[in-house]
Amino acid sequence: MRRVSILFLAFLCFVVGVAFIATPIPLGAPLFALSLVLIVASSRSATRLVTGVRIRAPLFDRCVGFLERRAGRLGRTLRKTSPRRYPRRPVV
């Protein structure tokens, strides 16, 4: 029940963040960041998905890395998705 409520809250933050993109007050980005942290904290498959996206998209990796450094305790949750934790496999 707790996991479902956290995922619902993350989805709600994401939807509200989308709604605030068009406003002159930049509230969308913090809500997106909060939804990302909540989803990663509650789902292993989301953690693997975010890690894969961070490996393939360097811009996204830099943005999430910025959030890791600035988020304090919540940054520890995002560090689980760091591609630097997983060394590249050699191509055979």
Image (cartoon, rainbow, N blue to C red):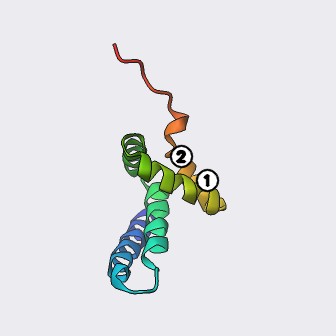
What residue do we see at 54% from left, 46% from top? 80
Q: Which mark is residue 14?
A: none
Looking at the image, which residue sits at the far bottom? 24
Residue 52, image x, y percentages: 38, 42
The answer to the question of whether label 2 and label 1 lie on touching residues, with beta carbons closer than 8 A, is: yes
Name the residue that disc number 2 marks: 80
- Is residue 28 visible from the viewing direction of this image? yes
Q: How many C-alpha atoms fall within 10 Å of the one at disc 2: few (<14), some, or many (≥20)? A: some
Q: Is residue 22 above or below residue 57?
A: below
Q: How many C-alpha atoms fall within 10 Å of the one at disc 1: few (<14), some, or many (≥20)? A: some
Name the residue that disc number 1 marks: 76
Taking 67 as reference, is 48 left or right? left
Most foreground residue, 29 or 73: 29
Q: Identity of the amino acid at label 1?
A: Arg
Q: How many marks?
A: 2
Residue 12, image x, y percentages: 37, 76
Q: Is residue 90 above or below residue 60?
A: above
Most foreground residue, 31 or 66: 66
Most foreground residue, 8 or 62: 62
Q: Identity of the amino acid at label 2?
A: Lys
Residue 2, image x, y percentages: 46, 66
- Identify the element where label 1 is drawn: helix
